[in-house]
Image (spheres, rainbow, N blue to C red):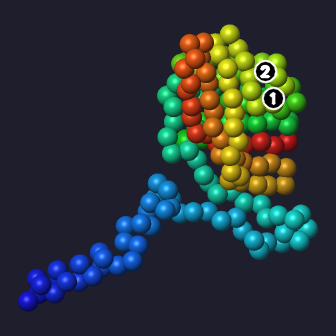
Amino acid sequence: MRASMLACLGIALCSGPNFGAAPLAQGHGRAHFQPPTQCPELRLEGFCPYDSGWRPAADNRLFSPLRPGDPEAQSGPLCTLRDSRGRTLLSYETENAAPAMRIGGRIVRFRPAADGDPDRFVSAAGRLRIREGAIVARDHESDGHRATLSFTDRRGRVHSASVRMDCGL
């Protein structure tokens, strides 16, 4: 009798509405983040500062973190692209963009693309493009975005990675 009652209880729980759908809807088991709507800054500044804590789920091993002594932005305004562990992959000044990053373990220096697009860079090794996505953090003089970092090598192969892009003064 106990076994049949436990079996019925198990079936009832498993057949309930949306059983097993919640983790899929949340994306990788993380809760969906909603920016705050009630805060003291809302009236004064028009928005609430927040940080969702979002980081990419996986990294592309071709893109290595910058090492001490590698070229990084020194003054603002600047943008920093980070991997899933918060390591800096790329850091550049937005007004004088000349980023450098490690690709395949070697430092590659870029210059702005000739078309004037501020998110496209070129080098002898290939082309780099940064595509901003949804805002994941915002503060008084900075914001954070989901972004896609794409590198097209000389052979035309595209290598992409999801990154967190933090820009500020």
Q: Is residue 141 above or below residue 131?
A: below
Asked whether residue 165 appears in the rendered view, the answer is no
Question: What percent of the width, then of the height, locates residue 41?
Answer: 85, 67
Name the residue that disc number 1 marks.
Answer: 117
Q: What secondary structure is marked by label 2?
A: loop
Return the mark for residue 157: none
Left or right? Give the position of 3 relative to 39.
left
Asked whether residue 27 appears in the rendered view, the answer is yes
Question: What percent of the width, then of the height, locates residue 153?
Answer: 59, 17
Q: Is residue 102 above or below residue 41?
A: above
Residues at marks 1 and 2, CA–CA distance in whole angstroms = 7 Å
Tag 2: Cα neighbours inside 10 Å, few (<14), some, or many (≥20)? Answer: some
Q: Residue furthest right?
A: 44
Quadrant where the image shows the N terminus:
bottom left
Image point 12% across, 84% down: which residue? 4
Question: What percent of the width, then of the height, locates residue 146?
Answer: 65, 46
Left or right? Give the position of 114 relative to 81.
right
Image point 65% across, 16% down: which residue? 126
Q: Residue furthest left?
A: 1
Mark 1–mark 2 contact, CB under 8 Å? yes
Is 12 in front, or is 108? 12
Image point 81% across, 29% down: which residue? 117
| Mark 1 residue type | Asp
Name the residue that disc number 2 marks.
Answer: 113
